[in-house]
Image: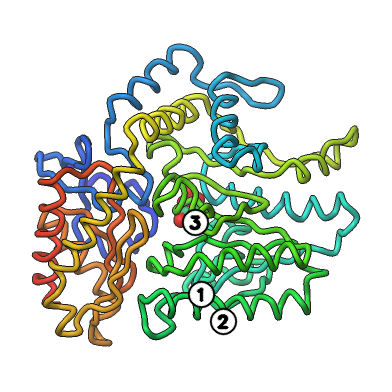
Amino acid sequence: MNWTARSLRSVWHPCTQMQLHEQLPLVALSHGQGAWLYDMQGVPYLDAISSWWVNLLGHAHPRINAAVKDQIDRLEHAMLAGFTHAPVVELSERLSALTGGVLGHCFYASDGASAVEIALKMSVHFWRNTGLPQKQEFVCVSSSYHGETLGALAVTDVPLFREAYGALLQGVHVVPSPDARSHAPSGDPAGAQKAAEQAAQHLEQLLQRRSNRIAAVILEPLVQCAAGMVMHHPSYVKRVRELCTQHQVHLICDEIAVGCGRTGTFFASEQAGIWPDFMCLSKGISGGYLPLSLVMTREAIYQAFYSPEVQRGFLHSHSYTGNPLACRAALATLDVLASDQVLQRNQRWSKAFTVRLAQALAPWQEADRIRHLRNCGMIWAFDVQVAEAERPAFARRFYAAALQAGVLLRPIGTTVYFMPPYILNEDETTWLLERTVVALKACSV
Ligand SMILES: *Cc1c(COP(=O)(O)O)cnc(C)c1O
């Protein structure tokens, strides 16, 4: 039996209706190199979504490999309670420096959902420690995604999950999304700004009514990725910051997907000129090598927990908190981003790719088969017009067609998006554009 068949018998795959694999290919990988994944037969696939948005600098990057190999001979892991080590200290210092020292304290976990849980718990515990124990409620944005453990799922507004697991979840306030598509002229900054203003007014009304009970607002700044690369104007993030400050409510920026340069700046929040009270990072922070997440927060929040009393301290731990291998992978990732001037290169690449993509898609846009072609930093997305009956199967069909054409693309609903690693060369860029066109034609878009 081959690896695919053995996997289908023994591995329960994530985010997958297993029965669909009776028709859909399950690809057994042999290795990865740069932007490419290779299956057991040696067939290459261009990883145009950075393996679920984590792989920033390509697979098997020589400098990240070297860092992890060096660390594994020193200290592979040790508990972070009572002990510390150079990689976790250095990473905390460097990330803090990237916020100008505003978010000077880093708390570690392993996956994104845990970072969200930590931020939610810290917020409520902060209010309790400062004499406002009734502030226990959260606000999230319509269509938000913050992870799938129960706390993170509670602030995730995806109907499918709410239907299945709603009974297990704490109630939250959901405010309208500032989705830039919701306002004409769509894609135009004026329309996007109008959508931002209107969405912020809904939040303002809620906070006026309820801020004495609300601990925090959680937000994916600039792009609600899992919602289908739903983009909004930075003025929304700025306004939410103002409202949170004014109403004594924390702002949690979930930059798990949009951080680490994905939107053009290292943190998406920078484009709004703000800092949150809690910043969640994961996904790309380790270059896509090892599970690592963290929450960065301010001095005043840290101080509210600093006390001789155990119960005032933050009560949270994971076995692999601050794993040294993962921290070394993260440090190497930050090194490469800085020394190769990756974000500066991305700016040029992004501009050129936007033009070429618009050219490649022009016939479909003119025929109104593709709408809302949009871009933010190193994220591109467009919505395919699909007949009602074909909508449920579109993502699977396109995924299979793209794989067949040699590209890993995994639409969300009828939204096709690109989230490539920051390393595509000229040939790879051309391959991506050409193969996308092939996949669109194969799906008779
Ligand atoms: C992926 C994601 C998470 C959850 O991270 P996991 O590591 O999958 O638990 C949370 N928030 C956002 C915005 C994400 O994109």
Q: As shown in the figure, which amino acid type bears the numbered disc 3?
A: Gln
Name the residue: 59% across, 31% down.
92
The first of marks 2 and 3 along the sequence is 2
In the rendered image, the quadrant that contains the C terminus is bottom left
Position of residue 437 in the picture relative to residue 215 (left or right): left
- Secondary structure of the residue carrying tag 3 is helix
Label number found at residue 271: 3
Check mark 3 vs ligand 1: CB closer than 8 Å? yes or no.
no
Q: Which image quarter holds the N terminus?
A: top left
Residue ID for mark 2: 198
Which residue is at 49% across, 72% downward? 143
Say which label, 3 or 1, has the lower sequence index.
1
Seen as rendered, the residue at the extreme top is 74
SS for tag 1? loop
The alpha-carbon separation of the residues under discs 2 and 1 comes to 8 Å
Residue 297 falls in image quadrant: top right
Q: Which residue corresponds to mark 1?
A: 178
User: Quick check: 239 left or right of 227?
Assistant: right
